[in-house]
Image: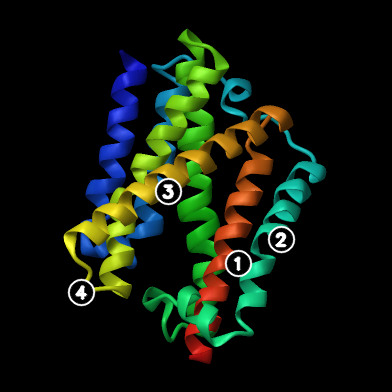
Amino acid sequence: MAAVLLTIVLVVYNNVANRWPPFNRGAYVPVNVVAGFLLGALALGPLGLNETSLGLTMQTARDFLTGAGLSLVMTAPMFVALLFERSRRLLADERVAGLTGGALLYQAAIRVPVGTAAFEELAFRGVLFAVWRQTTSTIVAATISSIAFGLWHIAPTLNLIAANRPTAGSRSKATAVAATVVAMTGAGLALVWLRVQSGGLAAPWALHATLNSLATLAAAAAHKKR
């Protein structure tokens, strides 16, 4: 029952928070940091988990480098795409339009690694995966936590559409949301696999943080070039 409730709470939390305008501005990082601490306290307290089951044991530099290296391979095509006008249009994101200097650095070095990647890895590859793993197999735990990770992205996808395609119809929005949920479920499974293989959250966090931060930089560069 605890695993089911936690799954529902996590999915509802992000999809409600992303409809609150301040959350998508200055409140994003502090709110998610507080939520992360509360989630960690819940896991180590009432849920009866420990640092090992959460993937919070000491990690090596190799784990961080593995995740970061994988992200470099995955994001390389984005930076190649910046060379071409048509692909630049696909990369450009109005949410980072005009960001330069300190504002862009904050997005890439704090908002994404801390507010997004650290919280999401703790929530899904740490706590939720471990809670389900207590009563089910690793495969079932990985599948459920990854589906929840996919559903977590419903409201953020709607925000992305509103910023970049404000005239999109209901059918286009539904298609984009469904595609994102499927894609993020797949990404979740890949991150769980990396978490299990590496024995902790360092590698998936490094992959997640570096990938999203580089994607943010690519989107900002694409918008500037346009």
Q: Amino acid at mark 4?
A: Thr
Q: Are marks 3 and 2 in contact (CB under 8 Å)?
A: no
Q: Which residue is mark 2?
A: 72
Which of labels 1 and 3 is toward the front?
Answer: 1
Disc on the earlier residue, 4 or 3: 3
Q: Are marks 1 and 4 in contact (CB under 8 Å)?
A: no
Front residue (pair 41, 222)? 222
Q: Residue at x 72, y 29 (%)?
A: 197
Q: Is residue 77 above or below residue 190?
A: below
Disc on the earlier residue, 1 or 4: 4
Q: Rounded to the nearest whole Å, what is the CA distance between mark 3 and mark 2?
A: 26 Å
Q: Which residue is mark 3?
A: 33
Quadrant hosting residue 204: top right
Q: Amino acid at mark 1?
A: Leu
Q: Position of residue 88 (x, y in %)?
A: 52, 81
Q: Which residue is mark 1?
A: 214
Q: Are marks 2 and 1 in contact (CB under 8 Å)?
A: yes
Which of labels 4 and 3 is toward the front?
Answer: 4
Q: Rounded to the nearest whole Å, what is the CA distance between mark 2 and mark 4?
A: 34 Å
Say whether residue 146 is visible. yes
Which of labels 3 and 2 is toward the front?
Answer: 2
Q: Amino acid at mark 2?
A: Leu
Q: Of helix, strand and loop, which one carries label 1? A: helix
Disc on the earlier residue, 2 or 1: 2
Q: Which residue is mark 4?
A: 167
Q: Residue at x 48, y 62 (%)?
A: 111
